[in-house]
Image (tube, rainbow, N blue to C red):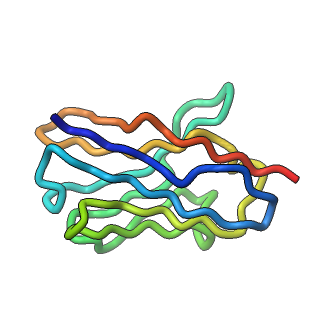
Amino acid sequence: QVQLVESGGGLVQPGGSLRLSCAASGFTFSRFAVSWYRQAPGKEREMVARISSAGRSPTYADSVKGRFTISRNNANNTVFLQMNSLKPEDTAVYYCYANPGMRNYWGQGTQVTISS
């Protein structure tokens, strides 16, 4: 079955960096786009970044442009989110998302907390 497993979250001071990973299995990873979403307490889930199947033309939310970079390794079925210059407002649970076979799949999420 399709599985998306996030890792790499944690507690970081403002201005710091984190690298999230999403390990995928159960589908032909290289054929599908993958996205990162986040959900902060009391807020709706929002898309942070998306990368195409071939890794070209990534897109980003305006709030993270210039600070976050999404990438993927199709040989290892993994997507990454490099997050730099982190701000307290980046605090959220971060989720990996893909929709192979036109069905929506989410990972369990990884908590990112930005605080001094």
The percent coordinates of residue 3 (x first, y second) are 26, 39
Using the rendered view, name the quadrant where residue 87 is placed.
Answer: bottom right
Q: Is 92 on the left or on the right of 85, as rendered?
A: left
x then y, percent, for residue 24: 27, 50
Q: Quadrant of the N terminus?
A: top left
At x 35%, y 36%, the residue is 106
75 w.r.t. 111: above or below: below
Q: Indicate the position of residue 115 as horizontal and vertical percent values.
A: 82, 50
Residue 92 at x, y percent in the picture: 63, 41
Residues 56 and 93: in front is 93
Please identify the residue farthest to the top as the structure is shown: 42
Question: Residue at left 57%, top 30%?
Answer: 44
Above or below, 57 against 112 in this view is: below
Taking the view exactly as shown, the residue that stands out farthest to the right is 116
Q: Nearer the viewer, residue 39 or 115?
A: 115
At 39% from the left and 69% from the top, the residue drawn is: 71
Left or right for 98, reference 68: left
- Please report the residue visible at 34 percent of the width from the left and 62 percent of the height from the top: 51
